[in-house]
Image: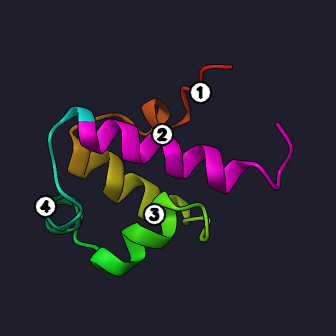
Amino acid sequence: MTPEELPKKLGEKIKTLRKSKKLSLKELALESDLEKSNLVRIESGRSCPSPKTLLKIANGLGLKLKDLFDFKY
């Protein structure tokens, strides 16, 4: 994976995890203390979140931070 591919892969992973937990974007935003619009940008790969934001998302999903980086090739 190249550095340019990371935001897209990360966004796809977060979206997959969110849907597997049957959470809407709004629900995850509330659980993560983030703006819904921010999550939309992250899931679409248009934004590469900071470590702090990633931790908030992982906590909102009830997961460990490392779970967000468990990519299948």
Q: Is residue 14 above or below residue 33?
A: above
Q: Mark 3 — residue?
A: 52
Q: Is residue 7 magenta?
A: yes
Work out whether mark 1 precedes mark 4 in sequence or the reverse, and give the earlier one. 4
Q: Which residue is label 2 attached to? A: 13
Quarter residue 70 falls in: top right
Q: Earlier in the sequence, mark 4 or mark 2?
A: 2
Residue density around tag 3, few if under 14, some if 14–19, many if 20 or more, within 10 Å: few
Dot 3 falls on a residue whose secondary structure is helix
- Disc 3 or disc 2, which is closer to the eye? 2
Q: Are marks 2 and 1 in contact (CB under 8 Å)?
A: yes
Q: Earlier in the sequence, mark 2 or mark 1?
A: 2
**Magenta extent:** 1-19
Which image quarter is the C terminus in? top right
Q: Which residue is mark 1?
A: 71
The residue to which callout 4 is attached is 27
Side of 33 relative to 8 (left or right): left
- How far, Cα to Cα, is label 3 from label 2? 17 Å
Helix, strand or loop at mark 1? loop
Q: Callout 1, which amino acid?
A: Phe
